[in-house]
Image: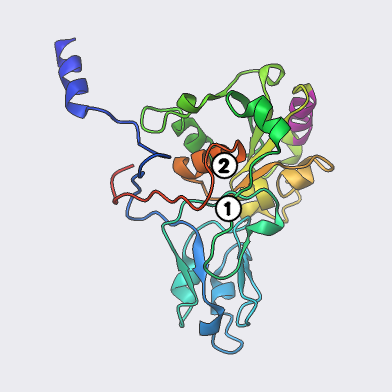
Amino acid sequence: MIGILRERLRLGHQTIAYPDGPARFPARFRGRPALDPARCAGGCAACAAACPTDAVLRPGTSELALDLGACVFCGACEEACPAGAIRFTRDYRLAMRTRPELAVRGDAPLLARALDERMKRLFGRSLRLRQVSAGGCNGCEAELNATGNIQFDLGRFGIQFVASPRHADGIVVTGPVTENMRAALRTTWEATPAPKLVIAVGACAISGGAFAGSPACHDGVDGGLPGVPVDLYIPGCPPHPVTLLDGLLRLLGRVEGDRLQLGDTGVL
């Protein structure tokens, strides 16, 4: 016991300061891409040819864009582009409210808008979520689980995951929504009391990701829950816990404006 206490004292305070201070990221972290279509060689499509999920849109033109909803952040497009028209930054702010907003153009980031005033009053101080793994690889699920650990401590913002949809304010969906999970996802949604939120986490839940077009899945929440609006898309493969925190807090109006808190290349 004495040894445990000594080690705990040695480790000190572990919770990151975000959103009031910087968060640390590993050196290999890739965040929001910045695009410079002016650098595109006429008609060059090397970046699109290298992309495994067809996330690069209109390559070689002045309308070059990158679909964050399909992007798996592998960096292949950046490596393949001979002119440096695509580069990945360390900006972790990736979440968006609508699917079209996930198409990145240029280098100025869009930031997720908050819920309306009525919904912020309902959920802004206490949000309970039921997570549904709809055929995911467990990458996004692992990062969601990490948001509750001592480094990120999602609970300090009044956000918690619950075991039953009947105790939830909304659902968080990961995975491409396989045919075998479609009915379970629908049942979970219907069991969640209104008003309720839907949050799609990861490339698979947004677009199908690497599994897009497979007859075994429905290419994410939009296809798996037709007619049910998604309130927040959080891209990534998987998204970093700080990206998850940022998206959820912006949705609730707890983080506003162009605030960006970048720290060093630590070990988190």
Q: Is residue 71 above or below residue 193?
A: below
Residue 137 visible in rendering:
no
Callout 1 secondary element = loop
Magenta-highlighted stretch: main secondary structure? helix
In the image, which residues are magenta?
182-190
* Residue at the bottom extreme, as displayed: 42
Residue 173 visible in rendering:
yes
Q: Is residue 42 above or below residue 80?
A: below
Residue 188 falls inside the magenta stretch: yes
**Which quadrant would residue 63 be assigned to in this image?**
bottom right
The x, y position of residue 135, in whole percent, is 64, 38
Is 229 left, or right, of 201 in this rendering?
right
Packing grade of label 1 (10 A; few <14, some 14-19, many >=20) is many
Residue 53 falls inside the magenta stretch: no
Is 78 left, or right, of 13 in this rendering?
right
Quadrant that contains the C terminus: top left
* Residue at the top extreme, as displayed: 1
Image point (63%, 82%), residue name:
61
Packing grade of label 2 (10 A; few <14, some 14-19, many >=20) is many
Q: How is the image coloured?
A: rainbow
Amino acid identity at mark 2: Arg
Quadrant that contains the N terminus: top left
Q: Which residue is mark 2?
A: 250
Q: Nearest the camera: 78 or 123? A: 123
Q: Which residue is mark 1?
A: 111
Q: Is residue 106 above or below residue 221?
A: below
Q: Which mark is residue 201?
A: none
Image point (40%, 28%), residue name:
149
The alpha-carbon separation of the residues under discs 1 and 2 comes to 8 Å
Image point (46%, 56%), residue name:
31
Residue contact at pointers 1 and 2, CB within 8 angstroms: yes
* Residue at the right extreme, as displayed: 227
